[in-house]
Amino acid sequence: MVGEHSKRAYDYVSDARFVRTSIILTLSKEGFEATVPFKGTLNREGFEVYLRGYLVLT
């Protein structure tokens, strides 16, 4: 069978050349706000922490 359509492929190749730093922020009329840099890649738990800790307060 050639290629199943309802399957998601997961793969990871570590890259020791650099450490990933991600940034999430909001943009308003006044400019950038609630800027949060963090190590690694954003996942659901990290985004929920950002929402509760930063956006709900503003």
Image: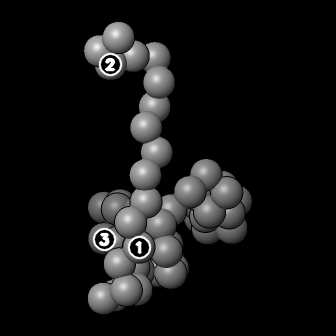
Please state which amino acid type lies under the numbered disc 2. Gly
Frontmost residue, 29 versus 18:
18
The residue carrying mark 3 is: 31
- Label 1: state its secondary structure: loop
Dot 2: within a 10 Å radius of its alpha carbon, few (fewer than 14), some, or many (20 or more) residues? few
Q: Position of residue 14 (x, y in %)?
A: 41, 73
Q: Which mark is residue 3?
A: 2
- Dot 3: what SS? strand
> What residue is pinned by disc 1?
14
Name the residue rendered at 35%, 61% in the picture: 28
* Residue 3, quarter of picture: top left
Q: Tag 2, which secondary structure?
A: loop
- The location of residue 7, given as percent across then percent down, is 47, 24
Residue depth check, mark 1 versus mark 2: number of the one nearer the observer: 2
**Residue 12 against residue 38 in the figure, above or below:** above
Taking the image as drawn, is residue 19 in sight? yes
Q: Which badge, 1 or 2, is on the more N-terminal residue? A: 2
The quadrant in which the C terminus is found is bottom right
Q: Residue furthest top?
A: 1
Residue 57 shows in the view: no
The answer to which quarter of the image holds residue 24 is bottom left
Q: Earlier in the sequence, mark 3 or mark 2?
A: 2
User: For the residues marked 1 and 2, what is the alpha-carbon distance in whole angstroms?
Assistant: 26 Å
Between 18 and 12, the one nearer to me in the picture: 12
| Kind of residue at badge 3 | Gly
